[in-house]
Amino acid sequence: MILVPAAIPERAPAFRRLVDPQIFPQARGGLTVEAIAAGARAEEATGSEAVTVLLAGRASWAGGTIGPGAGLYHPSGSRYGLSAGATPAVVLTVHALPGPAAGGDSVPLARQREGGVLTRAGGFAGMGVHWLATAATVGSRQLALATSTFTPSGSHDLHCHPDADEFFLVLAGGGDHLTEGGRVRLAQGDLAYVPAGEWHGFRTRRDVTTVALYGYLGAAGLEQAGYRIKEAA
């Protein structure tokens, strides 16, 4: 597990590479976060598909304006830009590994509730999920993005995804990132990056509701990523 504490910049302008395949060769993609100054514009051309999510502020793009929690999916080979409004805008960008250009324009992220009931039998307790970017919602190929909300004492048991890396960014609240070797405390703004096949989980504190932004790199949804619960000894 790669831990990036205090991942979100507090002042603009700022730019941080949270996970970079050039530094971590095993990573199946990369993550950056940028604080765009009020009235400024950030543009990027990418050789890989990408997702941008607005964490704070408001920003405009060719198709309109987005606020916190909204975002855009960008097919491989596209060029995209965001302009901050009257206050700074903080944007998280998730990149898959470079691939052939797919063509097409950027599209807004969807918000689709996880189907079925998440119960302890599936490794979940007190957890709700909304998918924002998957193959089914926006046509992604090698990445997926979702939000999860843990009610107080909510948890996700030790599990792994053999075919995808996972990242987990705490937007509000906090708790313990679970590993085979013990627990790692995660606070608001901390990021955990989990390589494919590594056992991991999460447990929020008893008095705290935790909201996280998470996703997969190397797969466009839960089924592609694979999902295995670690059986209790």
Image (tube, helix red, strand yellow):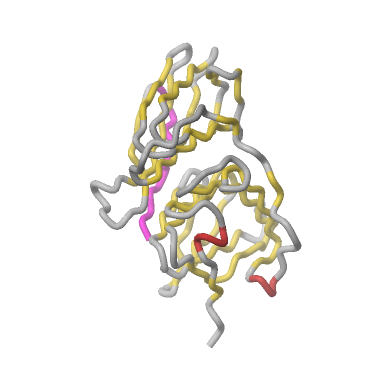
Determine the residue positioned at 60% across, 18% down: 64
**Residue 177, relative to residue 199: is it above or below?**
above
Residue 131 percent across, percent down from the top left:
63, 47
The answer to which of 95 and 84 lies nearer the viewer is 95
Q: Which residues are magenta?
A: 1-12
- Residue lying at the far right in this picture: please name it: 117
**Residue 8 falls inside the magenta stretch:** yes
Q: As displayed, is residue 138 above or below residue 44?
A: below
Residue plotted at (43% across, 39% down): 49
| Residue 165, picture quadrant | bottom left
Where residue 57 sits, quadrant-wise, is top right
- Point 52% across, 35% down: residue: 73
Q: What predominant SS class does the magenta segment belong to?
A: loop
Image quarter hosting the N terminus: bottom left
Apparent side of residue 42 relative to residue 66 in the rendered image (left or right): left
User: In front: 54, or 57?
Assistant: 54
Which residue sits at x=56%, y=74%?
229
Image location (x, y in percent) of residue 173 = 59, 49
The single residue placed furthest to the bottom in the displayed view is 233
In this view, the residue in front, 59 or 144, is: 144
Q: Quick check: is 31 in the magenta stretch?
A: no
